[in-house]
Amino acid sequence: MSGQSSIVAMKKIVQQLRFEAGINRVKVSLAAADMQQFCLQNAQHDPLLTGMSSSNNPFRPQKVCSFL
């Protein structure tokens, strides 16, 4: 029985490896160039690069109201 289960397990491994071998891959240089182009195109909308006005900043310290 142990031999049968190991054969089934090996068939599953071979099937998975065949599936992974058939996946289309993108070269790292092309992916990096696409990512750089995306970042440059969207840089004007990035608040980490352009900053944020204090009136639109949801994380600004809240004003304290005090009466004298």
Image: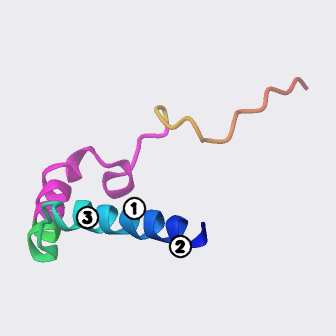
| Residue 16: % across, % down | 33, 62
Q: Residue furthest right?
A: 68
Nearest the camera: 15 or 31? 15
38 is within the stretch colored magenta: yes
Q: Quadrant of residue 36?
A: bottom left
For disc 2, the marked residue is: 3
Q: Residue 1 shows which numbered tag?
A: none
Q: Split into 4 quadrants, where in the image is the N terminus? A: bottom right
- Residue type of the residue flagged with mark 2: Gly
Q: Amino acid at mark 3?
A: Glu
Residue holding disc 3: 20
Q: Could you tell me residue 51's position as x and y percent?
A: 38, 51
Q: Which element carries disc 2, helix, strand or loop?
A: helix
The mark found on residue 12 in the picture is 1
Give 11 or 62, whichever is nearer the viewer: 11
Identify residue type, mark 1: Lys
Residue range of the region highlighted in magenta in the rendering = 34-54
Single out the mark in the foreground, 1 or 3: 1
